[in-house]
Image: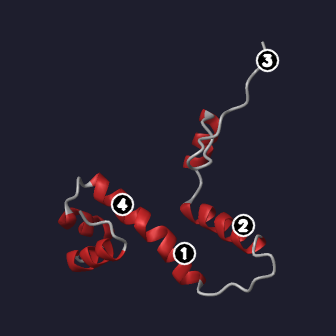
């Protein structure tokens, strides 16, 4: 019987192969960020990039806030403490990214 290739999760391109998941867990977040930025620059097709810092923050911050809010079951005080920001800043960011309920 032929061996099947590990399937990729269509929603985020992460392999379902356990060895790949372990390898991913051992990589630093900075490695993933660097890879994503290198890919972004490689695919510009001659366009000049601008506002990269803002682009990265707008891509990353919503995921951070969504994940921490899920982890704290929506408790903004605990989430703000985990994030190392004050609750007012958290509320402002949740509103900005339309993550408030």
| Cα gap from disc 4 to disc 1, whole angstroms | 16 Å
Q: Secondary structure at mark 4?
A: helix
Write down the residue under mark 3: 2
Residue 59 appearing in the image: yes
Specify which label sits upstream in the sequence, 1 or 2.
2
Q: Secondary structure at mark 2?
A: helix
Q: Secondary structure at mark 3?
A: loop
Q: Position of residue 48 (x, y in %)?
A: 73, 86
Write down the residue under mark 4: 66
Q: Any mark on residue 39, and which? A: 2
| Cα gap from disc 2 to disc 3, whole angstroms | 33 Å
Mark 1 and mark 3 in contact (Cβ < 8 Å)?
no
Q: Position of residue 40 (x, y in %)?
A: 69, 70
Query: Few, some or many C-alpha atoms within 10 Å of disc 4 (few <14, some 14-19, many ≥20)?
Result: some
| Cα gap from disc 3 to disc 1, whole angstroms | 42 Å
Which residue is rendered at x = 58% and y = 66% of the image?
Answer: 30
Residue 5: which quarter of the image?
top right
Residue 27: which quarter of the image?
bottom right
Specify which label sits upstream in the sequence, 4 or 3.
3
- Position of the N terminus, as image quadrant, is top right
Write down the residue under mark 1: 56
């Amino acid at each position: 019987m032929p061996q099947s290739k590990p399937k990729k999760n269509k929603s985020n391109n992460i392999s379902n192969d356990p060895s790949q998941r372990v390898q991913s867990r051992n990589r630093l977040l900075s490695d993933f960020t660097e890879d994503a930025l290198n890919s972004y620059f490689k695919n510009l097709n001659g366009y000049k990039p601008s506002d990269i810092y803002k682009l990265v923050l707008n891509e990353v911050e919503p995921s951070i806030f969504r994940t921490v809010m899920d982890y704290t079951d929506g408790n903004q005080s605990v989430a703000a403490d985990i994030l190392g920001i004050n609750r007012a800043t958290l509320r402002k960011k949740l509103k900005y990214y339309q993550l408030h309920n």
